Image (cartoon, rainbow, N blue to C red):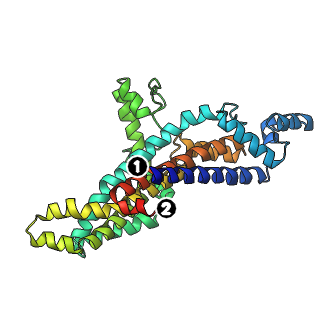
């Protein structure tokens, strides 16, 4: 298991380095001048050149990348041209909001997806199975941003059940930052009204974000359950008179969960990237909205910071899934 984990860690480092190189190159060859944007519309040539030298934009691209890596390793994530704040401080402010949204969304997808997949498999080709399959096809085909807009129009504007967007009400004071996770900090500070308000604001974006993941988890779990329920050891367990619940929940589900766990890990990573659309639609103050604003203003340092954080957590999630996969199925470790 140690050798298996070490190889996965080395692969993760190489992938992160490659992601950095690709993102850095693309962000620096776009036809835009961040120095001119930072200097302002009334800046003259000398002022623009001074900004270019200050941010190191006058150096060759390869040298800029090496300098950036050196600063990154020393803990310097750079400074935003648009906000003039250190990128690290911005990430600490925005990323926890994204984490809360993604964790809440994947929790909804897992808590509903696995049971619905089991129900569909056990009741194959029955009405409930057809209803669930229609739900999964719809979830896979429907764009997240469109679902978010429709949810805003119906549940927020027409019915008034949920807020249209934002993190908390404008007149609500945020709790003292301890973990920088608003829901957790509200509970730790005893601000239960703020906790309910923040949870209320999270419902619509979380449902819109989780719907494709929910559909994928149901589809994979249903397919694997159907395959597992046909195996000889399941037939033997039924012949021995074991209850259907024990056969499904104990024997069949464990093997069916292997591909399902892989799908959960992939979907968690895709959710981190998918928050760009959802956060923009719901004006959610997360790293996705932060990255969009940085891209609009050609602010390279925040784009790189957001890419590093999202890429790292995507790869970390898949590493954890690989380790769980290797724990449940020793054959995976033996192939490494």
Horizontal and vertical percent for residue 156?
Answer: 42, 47
Residue placed most toward the observer, 148 or 262: 262
Horizontal and vertical percent for residue 171?
Answer: 47, 27
Which numbered disc flags the more N-terminal residue, 1 or 2? 1
Q: Which residue bears the numbered disc 2?
A: 143
How packed mark 2 is, by other alpha carbons closer than 10 Å (few <14, some 14-19, many 20 or more), is some
Q: Quadrant of residue 321?
A: bottom left
Q: Is residue 3 left or right of residue 305?
A: left
Q: Is residue 332 left or right of residue 33?
A: left
Residue 121, numbered circle: none
Please determine whether, in this image, residue 228 is positioned above or below residue 196: below
Q: Which residue bears the numbered disc 1?
A: 105
Secondary element at image label 2: loop
Please determine whether, in this image, residue 62 is positioned above or below residue 47: below
Secondary element at image label 1: helix
Q: Are marks 1 and 2 in contact (CB under 8 Å)?
A: no
Q: Residue at x 80, y 45 (%)?
A: 63
Q: Residue at x 15, y 60 (%)?
A: 246
Q: Is residue 283 left or right of residue 54?
A: left
The answer to whether one can see residue 278 in this image is: no
Horizontal and vertical percent for residue 302?
Answer: 66, 41
Q: CA distance from mark 1 to mark 2?
A: 16 Å
Q: Quadrant of residue 229?
A: bottom left
Q: Residue at x 35, y 61 (%)?
A: 258
The answer to whether one can see residue 28 in this image is: yes
């Amino acid at each position: 298991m140690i050798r298996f984990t070490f190889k996965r860690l080395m692969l993760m480092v190489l992938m992160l380095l490659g992601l950095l190189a690709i993102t850095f190159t693309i962000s620096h060859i776009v036809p835009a001048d961040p120095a001119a944007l930072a200097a302002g519309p009334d800046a003259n040539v000398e002022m623009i050149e001074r900004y270019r030298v200050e941010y190191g934009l006058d150096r060759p691209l390869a040298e800029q990348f090496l300098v950036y890596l050196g600063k990154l390793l020393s803990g310097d994530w750079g400074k935003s041209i648009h906000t003039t704040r250190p990128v690290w401080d911005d990430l600490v402010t925005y990323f926890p909001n994204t984490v809360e949204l993604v964790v809440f969304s994947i929790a909804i997808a897992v808590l509903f997806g696995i049971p619905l997949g089991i129900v569909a498999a056990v009741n194959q080709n029955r009405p409930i199975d057809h209803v669930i399959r229609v739900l999964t096809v719809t979830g896979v085909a429907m764009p997240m941003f469109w679902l978010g807009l429709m949810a805003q129009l119906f549940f927020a504007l027409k019915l008034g059940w949920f807020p249209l967007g934002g993190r908390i009400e404008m007149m609500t004071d945020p709790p003292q930052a301890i973990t920088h996770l608003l829901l957790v900090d509200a509970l730790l500070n005893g601000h239960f009204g703020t906790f309910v308000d923040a949870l209320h604001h999270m419902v619509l974006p979380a449902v819109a974000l989780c719907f494709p993941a929910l559909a994928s988890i149901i589809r994979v779990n249903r397919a694997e359950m159907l395959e597992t329920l046909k195996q000889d050891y399941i037939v033997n367990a039924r012949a021995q008179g074991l209850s259907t619940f024990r056969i499904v929940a104990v024997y069949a589900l464990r093997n069916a969960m292997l591909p399902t766990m892989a799908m959960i890990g992939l979907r968690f990573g895709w959710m981190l990237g998918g928050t760009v659309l959802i956060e923009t639609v719901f004006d959610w103050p997360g790293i996705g909205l932060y990255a969009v604003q940085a891209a609009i203003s050609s602010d390279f340092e925040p784009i790189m910071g957001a890419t590093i954080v999202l890429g790292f957590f995507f790869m970390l999630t898949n590493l954890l899934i690989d380790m769980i996969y290797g724990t449940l199925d020793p054959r995976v470790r033996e192939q490494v």
